[in-house]
Image: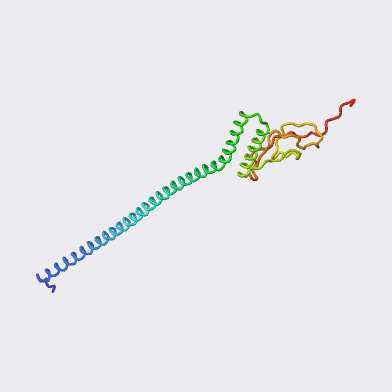
Amino acid sequence: MFKKPKSEDTENLKAAMEATEEAVAADKENIKVTDSTSEVDNLVSEESKIEELEKQLEAEKNRNLLLQADFQNYRKRVAKELGAARIQGLHETVNPFIQVFDYFQLATKAAEDSDNIDAIRTGMNLIANEYQKALDELGISKINAIGETFNPEIHEAVAHEASELPEGKIIKEWNCGYRLGERLLRPSKVVVSSGNAPEQDGE
């Protein structure tokens, strides 16, 4: 015959069920807390990465600013050095000709006060020698043209004339040419022989 459960057994069973429900609820809460903690950890990790990237970006910006400042300083320094070199080059170029100009002024004054042609000629020769000296100091050399074969790389023909020299030979020079080292400063302006003049009938 089925026995009716005692009231004490019922209470124990009820308490056990409540304890089980509480344990299940606690487990669920623990799971929620664990998930939340994991999400927080992930967020903290992402924020740390972002902060690190921001620091790296800031460092690169600063480095770029420093490079730009260095480049600007370099450009200013180079411009200053080029300017100084240009002034030095002008000084070295002009200075010898100032001396020649001094001699020229002295010769001009002497010619005004004297009728001595020989003295004037001597003064002009002195100027010519000083001028040549100045050109030599700068490495400038004259191109010899008279009697040479016409070369379009260093000669500029301004006319052709019949002469006893073979065709293509230079017979006159209007302006002499100059070189600076191997570089052509200006070509010689010359008159080129066109060969012997044709004989006229009856001569």
Q: Residue 114's x, y, as percent?
A: 63, 29
Q: Position of residue 128 (x, y in %)?
A: 65, 38
Looking at the image, which residue is at 70% across and 33% down?
174
Please state, as top left, top right, bottom left or bottom right, where the C terminus lies in the image.
Answer: top right
Instruction: Check the image and name the residue furthest to the right.
Output: 202
- In depth, the one of 81 and 95 nearer the eye is 95
Outermost residue to the left: 7
Is residue 103 toward the left or the right of residue 54 in the image?
right
Looking at the rendering, which quadrant does residue 179 occupy? top right
Left or right placement of residue 177 versus residue 49 in this view: right
Taking depth in this image into account, of 58 and 49 the one nearest to the observer is 58
The percent position of residue 194, horizontal first and vertical second, equals: 79, 33
Where in the figure is residue 200, as x and y percent of width and height?
87, 27
Quadrant including the N terminus: bottom left
State left or right for residue 56 relative to residue 25. right
Number of labels in the image equals 0
By what rule are the colours in the image chosen?
rainbow
The residue sitting at the top extreme is 202
Q: Residue at x 46, y 48 (%)?
A: 74
Residue 147 is left or right of residue 35, and the answer is: right
In depth, the one of 123 and 4 nearer the eye is: 123
